[in-house]
Amino acid sequence: MNRPDYFLVDLPAEAVITPDLITQAAQTLKLNRERYLSQRTTVSLVKTFCQLAQSWLEPEFPFRVEALQLGPAAAGIPAATLARGLDDFFGRFTTGDFAAWLEQEFGQADRLDTLGASRPEQRGQRRSMAQGPELIAWMPAAEPPIGPLMNLVEGFLVRSAQFIQCPKPAVFLARLFAHSLYEVEPKLGACLEIASWGDGRPELEDALWVETDAVVANGSAPKLEAIRGRLPGKVRFFGDEERVSFGFITCQALQSLAGLEIVENAVADIVSWNQAGPLAPQVFYVERGPGSAAEVFAEQLAGALAKWESQHPRGPLLAPAAAAIATRRSLYAIRAAHSPDTRCWFSQGSDAWSVVYEADPRFQVSCRQRFIYVKAVADLTEALQGADAFRHRISSVGLAATEAQAQDLARQLAAWGTPRICPLGRMQNPNLAGRRDGQPTLARLVHWTDWEL
């Protein structure tokens, strides 16, 4: 479906984006923010996003229909995977969840609207108000593709105009969501710009950064340091390093009546967004127990992935991703042939899914795309020792344990520094109000004004 040219990403492929064009776009965004966004109330913005989310949950919503029809070709995401991801994402958008999020970040939900006072401030005879940057430049990760959508919501909640420099894999969904917002709130849409120029255009980034107040970027540590070094001194920088996640499953939980449910929940975490993004599990640590519990779990996981593939195929891969899986499979097939400490289960005739069991507890970053490790450990302590090299990069731990075990395990994970602990099956579907990687999301963007009475 043809869309109007509201954003730079809508321009034809032959269009030339210049630094002057970026400067003009950024200045227009700031002007539109002053006209249309700065005086909007939090209640009105939350209402807009909740209503738009409800539309995206409707099967016949034109933008959702287009996403599911064109998503497999345009973004490499199977329709079933995309539909499930959209339902999970937009299902979080309720007025109650937004209120809880805002209260958690600012103490009161209206702190971006007016000078208010918490109880400590009342005792100190103060009022205060939070204000967001005039213009935020976002540089989100390529996966999962809902990342830029969440950035957009965060920026508008703090009343900031936004320029999203979107990576190619995420452009399709970000563009559709932006157009759906423009259709219902054109003035709000006028405070947003989306562009995608790939790497190798530093002159465009420099032109943008001169006009911005804050830059939020995702990527590797070297990439983030390179960006930090190029920013003008007035610009605040928030660098979110790439992160990974894993699951931990106790033997007692597997032996309970919920054993098969645990397998299904683990599969749900793997197939969500085809295992893309920081919340996707790379490894499942399983406590050793009677009957080779970890190996049995790995075999059951393989069977569940095979069943899922028959109903919801992962879809074809680009050549580099397929080559990475083929190489990794060959390596572990050789290991399995020579050691009982390694076993493999691979989809036949395709690279649709892969399960590798190892007795070695060291954390492994998988190829993603439904490639998962299962590792046997004596207990959570051994699992954390195995993952210690990635300790500063862990995003989430999915936990499957009995009720009697969960409290102590959660404390141990918290003491280790785990930012987020959640039930298995919800790793890729965080609570809207949840802190991201242990840090506030909205509160970090704002500055405060204190009024001493």
Image (cartoon, rainbow, N blue to C red):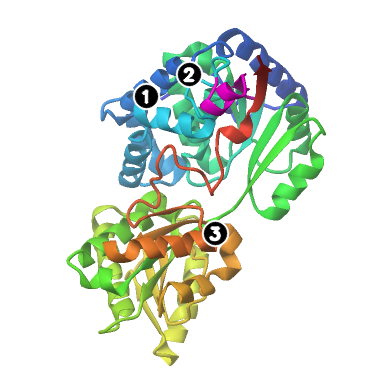
Q: Residue 42 bears which disc, if any?
A: 2
Q: Amino acid at mark 2?
A: Thr
- Circles 2, 3 touching at the beta carbon (< 8 Å): no
Numbered disc in front, either 1 or 3: 3
Q: Amino acid at mark 1?
A: Cys
Circle 3 crowding by C-alpha within 10 Å: few under 14, some 14–19, many from 20 = some
Measured in 3D between alpha carbons, the distance from the residue under mark 2 to the one under mark 3, in whole angstroms, is 33 Å
Q: Residue 40 bears which disc, if any?
A: none
Identify the secondary structure beneath mark 2: helix
Q: Choose top left, top right, bottom left or bottom right for residue 359.
A: bottom left
Q: Residue reaching furthest left?
A: 257
Between discs 1 and 3, the one toward the N terminus: 1
The stretch of residues the image draws in magenta is 117-134
* Residue in view at x 49 percent, y 20 percent: 110
Between discs 2 and 3, the one toward the N terminus: 2
Looking at the picture, how far across and down is residue 334, in whole percent? 46, 85
Identify the secondary structure beneath mark 3: loop
Between discs 2 and 1, the one toward the N terminus: 2
Looking at the picture, how far across and down is residue 340, in whole percent? 39, 90
Q: Residue reaching furthest front?
A: 123
Q: Quarter of the image for the C terminus: give it.
A: top right
Q: Residue reaching furthest bottom?
A: 338
Numbered disc in front, either 2 or 1: 2
Q: Residue 417 bears which disc, if any?
A: 3
